[in-house]
Amino acid sequence: MFIDIAGYTAIMQRDEQEALKLLNQFKDTLERLTPKHQGQIVQYFGDGCLLSFESSTQCVSCAMSLQREFNDTRLSPVRIGMHLGEVIFQNNNVFGDGVNIASRVESIGIPGAVLMSKSIRDQIKNKSDFQLVSLGSFEFKNVEEPMEVFALANKGLVVPDRQNLKGKIQVPSPDRRLQSTKMIRFIAGIFLGLLVAAGFYFLYQVLREKSDSSQLASIRSIKSIAVLPFSDLSQLQNQAYFNDGITEDIILHLSQITGLKVISRTSAFHYQGSRLTIPQIGMELGVDHILEGSVRHVGNKIHIVVQLINVKTDAHLWAETYDRELTAKNLFAIQSDVAKKITTSLKGQLLEEEEQQLDQKPTDNLEAYTAYLQGGQHLRRLDYTEIRNAITYYERAIELDSTFAYAHAALGNAYALASTDYGGFVPEQGFKTAKEYGLRALSLNPTNVVARTLLGDILFWHEWNWQEAELEYKLAIELDPNYVGSRFGYAYLLSARNRHLEAIEQLERCLELDPKNPNAFSNAAWRNLNARDYPSVIKCTDEVLKMDPGNRDALVARAWALLYSGQTNEAIEVFLEHGYPPHRGYALAISGRIEAAKAILEEFHQQSKESYVPPAGFIMINMGLKDFDEAFKWMEVAFQDRSREILLLDGYQIYDDLRGDPRFEAFRQRLDLAPWNE
């Protein structure tokens, strides 16, 4: 296997420090993942690397893992090429046709793709884990016969268009022949034992040099889209939830397409009713294409108009009008058709497995689908009462169609949220119910990303099964790299495990996919708070407050950052004006207003006689009062209740007063927290 960083020369010329950082991350990733697939790093060649494996299956599995890792974390844009052939190891170097052909296959690759010769394909063609697409035959330089090249087409990988492949596949010009002759002589000298590594690096660089910039531009120029909320042209204009649901479902469909960057719902809906032009919106969202549309209801008929627009030129690439009777079958057929035509317009091809996904109908019952959409309208408000309203609608949807997987997943998600500080359900009961609905959703549709993320949340928040939760989050991200919900959950887990840099990387990807979502920036603020990077907390909350000046989560995160940066009076002022009751009680305690803080504690005690009160509030105020014995008492309650707030003992400086106390260290051990580093 050959793998290299695409466009590295240009990056080095532009920013040497950034290039060196990318190179170090590139090597770290290779050295971490290659041994897991029984592979061996043979030799580095500048920003490229040669690897060998005991079998073709291990080689392809490793290539898939590596490319997904680089795509997910945005460490660097890499190309991968593989070939099965004879090699010679001599003096810690490797030679032979196997090496040369692998380097040529890699040279025509593009970032995000995994390419292989027919020799590899023949070894794995009966392996159901791998999906392959033939790119046709290529005439490689100094290879006698044309060779067929295949691309791995699994989820999360890029399948390139043949016309975009610009590596060394043409007959060379006379000047290039002369250069090749010199190179062959040079390599011949290497085979005699002179300057092996330097000569091979020169060959490697020549094979790939010209293709870097054009391929990188090609891969990035046609694969990003935002779907704006459809306008309601109905006479009564009372179908907003229904029209929004159509938009959301098209976003969901497109996010399942390999190689498409799809802006998330919240950022797309930020432009509902906007007066900005399409080019202006596209520039703000960082996309190349915009889909906009309208919906009009007339009796039992529905009229939908959609159009795909090129952001740079403001030109209409494709438009369609649908006039149908309003039935579930017709509605989902329209959504599927729109997604297929967009994919064809942007990528030029639709994989068979993607087409099958797009053709799936979530339900045949229009009334159930309507109830499901109404539930989502309430759940997004994240309010105690609204979550309960959402549960009612989701239960109605399931009553109408017990096989409606999306409704089961959404109902499970509502119960999980209600079992945190958002909803006031007793965690033991709420999470148990949430898991039942999540598992039911997965039994109906194993690829349901909301259900998969929900299972990760439950394993993390309530069952405290770190390893299984991480696996579920990673699987959810693999199923739909554009779904920010799974990345939010995974970032939370990484913070709790003191893996703060990884958590921030996930949030950076969320901000790329959802740049106009205040909650995305708020999440980033909290993860930076856990990492104790207080200037970054302030920057993130600045962005939130530009979009949503009254966002309480952001204001509270900002107050903690101000407090730990030494701006105590400013922090107390924010807590008292914008904080939730526990934060107000804490602010009163640290400012010396002891009786007022205790009065809030008494309110909690009285409220707990009628409904569940999360123990986090009791812990916080007692920490402010410096009553550590009482704080430990409520920490034990939180442990017994499986309250998720206790999972971030290391993430909040408020607990630093307890460090060194044997009781605190005992709690850390019971929670199986990662080692603590100051």
Image (cartoon, helix red, strand yellow):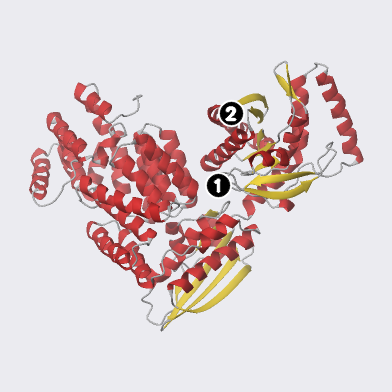
Residue pushed farthest right? 174
Callout 2 crowding tier (Cα within 10 Å): few <14, some 14–19, many ≥20: some
The numbered mark at residue 257 is none
Tell me: 406 left or right of 653: right
Tell me: 584 left or right of 296: left
Callout 1 crowding tier (Cα within 10 Å): few <14, some 14–19, many ≥20: many
Q: Are marks 2 and 1 in contact (CB under 8 Å)?
A: no
Using the image, determine if residue 448 lies above or below residue 575.
Answer: below
Q: Quadrant of the N terminus?
A: top right
Image point (35%, 72%), residue name: 367
In the structure shown, which secondary structural element does the residue marked by tag 2 occupy? helix
- Kindly identify the amino acid type of the residue bearing the numbered disc 1: Gly
Using the image, determine if residue 465 lies above or below residue 555.
Answer: above
In the structure shown, which secondary structural element does the residue marked by tag 1 occupy? loop
Q: Quadrant of residue 22?
A: top right
Tell me: 514 left or right of 430: right
Q: Which residue is mark 2?
A: 27
Q: Nearer the viewer, residue 199 or 448?
A: 448
Q: Nearer the viewer, residue 487 or 38?
A: 38
- Kindly identify the amino acid type of the residue bearing the numbered disc 2: Lys
Q: Quadrant of residue 663?
A: top left
